[in-house]
């Protein structure tokens, strides 16, 4: 029997895989019906191998370690977290607050520059003007005299500059000329290639009696013009109102006599012209 058992046991793996011949299979099964030892061995062979068991101890102890540390440092972690959160919000507040304060300061404390000293005219007008006055939104200012002549009698001069976000300029200059100079200046202004302006910023024209000598208007940036008012002889008033974005932050009416504005000029915030143009 022992030798047959050895042969059967050698064949068992092939038998289990169903890789034996029909005659071998019969032989093995006959043997199993007679030999309980081989049958038992075959049964054992069919059992799946026992699972490898790892100890859970290290993982558990690690968790315990963490728990212990947490308990011990819990208040510190909470404190550090709270401090970090507080710092984050304080920082944000500081940044936002700072920005708001800066913007508020910027609006509140942007000075409105007013200069009525005609000695400074060259700083405001022309090629040698200060940088911030040199290019007023690309507007042509050549209607204004290039410089103040010695013979001209300056009756009024005011330059107003305000730049809270975008630069805006409101200026006027009134000069009384002698006869010859007045004639020359009128001739210069008449030869100026004046532009359309009616309708811009709701403007309808000029007051009755006021003679418009020259006009450079831009449907967006405003007006530069020269007028002659009826009550003053040999006298010309030069005006510019320059801004952008369809309105002025400046309370412009406070800075120039109403008679020098074109009639119905409206560049206040939310003016009808702005609403029309932005549609
Ligand atoms: Zn056997």
Image: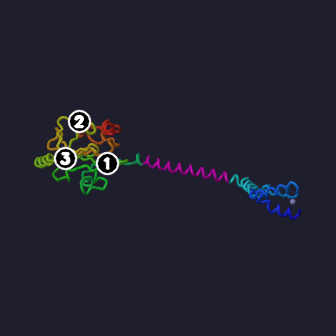
Q: Residue 204 carries which label?
A: 2
Residue 48 sits above or below residue 155 on the image? below
| Earlier residue among tags 3 and 2 | 3
Q: Which residue lies furthest to the left in this view?
A: 180
Q: Image point 88% across, 58% down: which residue? A: 37
Measure the alpha-carbon separation of dots 3 and 1.
Answer: 21 Å
Q: Estimate the x, y position of residue 68 in percent, counting from the top left.
A: 75, 55
Tell me the magenta residue range: 77-105
Q: Residue furthest front?
A: 23
Q: Which mark is residue 117?
A: none
Disc 1 residue crowd, few under 14, some 14–19, many 20+, Cα 10 Å: many
Q: Estimate the x, y position of residue 54 in percent, counting from the top left.
A: 77, 58
Q: Judge whether residue 98 can be spotted in this image.
A: yes
Residue that label 1 marks = 161
Measure the alpha-carbon separation of dots 3 and 2.
Answer: 25 Å
Q: Estimate the x, y position of residue 120 in percent, counting from the top left.
A: 26, 53
Measure the alpha-carbon separation of dots 2 and 1.
Answer: 26 Å
Q: Residue 175 carries which label?
A: 3
Q: Is mark 3 on a helix, strand or loop?
A: strand
State whether the magenta stretch is mostly helix, strand or loop.
helix
Disc 2, disc 1: CB below 8 Å? no
For the residue pair 235 and 71, the one nearer the viewer reads as 71
| 78 magenta-colored | yes
| Earlier residue among tags 3 and 1 | 1
In the image, ligand 1 is in what quadrant?
bottom right
Q: Is mark 2 on a helix, strand or loop?
A: loop
**Which corner quadrant of the image does residue 252 belong to?**
top left
| 254 magenta-colored | no
For the residue pair 243 and 116, the one nearer the viewer reads as 243
């Amino acid at each position: 029997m022992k030798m047959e058992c050895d042969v059967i046991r050698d064949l068992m793996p092939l038998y289990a895989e169903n890789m034996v011949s029909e005659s071998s299979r019969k032989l093995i099964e006959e043997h199993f019906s007679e030999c309980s030892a081989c049958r038992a061995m075959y049964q054992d062979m069919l059992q799946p191998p026992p699972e490898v068991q790892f100890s859970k101890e290290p993982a558990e102890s690690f968790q315990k370690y963490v728990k212990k540390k947490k308990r011990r440092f819990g208040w510190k972690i909470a404190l550090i977290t709270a401090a970090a959160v507080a710092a984050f919000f304080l920082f944000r507040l500081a940044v936002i607050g700072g920005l708001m304060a800066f913007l508020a300061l910027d609006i509140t404390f942007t000075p409105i520059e007013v200069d009525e000293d005609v000695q400074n005219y060259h700083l405001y007008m022309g090629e040698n003007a200060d940088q911030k006055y040199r290019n007023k939104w690309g507007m042509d200012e050549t209607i204004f005299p290039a410089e103040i002549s010695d013979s001209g009698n300056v009756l009024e001069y005011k330059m107003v500059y305000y730049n809270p976000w975008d630069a805006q300029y409101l200026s006027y200059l009134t000069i009384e000329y002698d006869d010859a100079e007045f004639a020359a200046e009128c001739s210069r202004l008449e030869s100026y290639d004046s532009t359309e302006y009616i309708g811009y910023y709701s403007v309808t024209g000029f007051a009755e009696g006021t003679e418009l000598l020259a006009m450079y208007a831009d449907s967006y940036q405003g007006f530069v013009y020269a007028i002659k008012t009826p009550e003053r002889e040999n006298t010309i008033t030069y005006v510019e109102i320059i801004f952008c974005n369809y309105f002025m932050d400046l309370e412009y009416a406070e800075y120039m006599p109403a008679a020098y504005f074109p009639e119905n000029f409206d560049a206040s915030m939310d003016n009808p012209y702005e609403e029309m143009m932005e549609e």
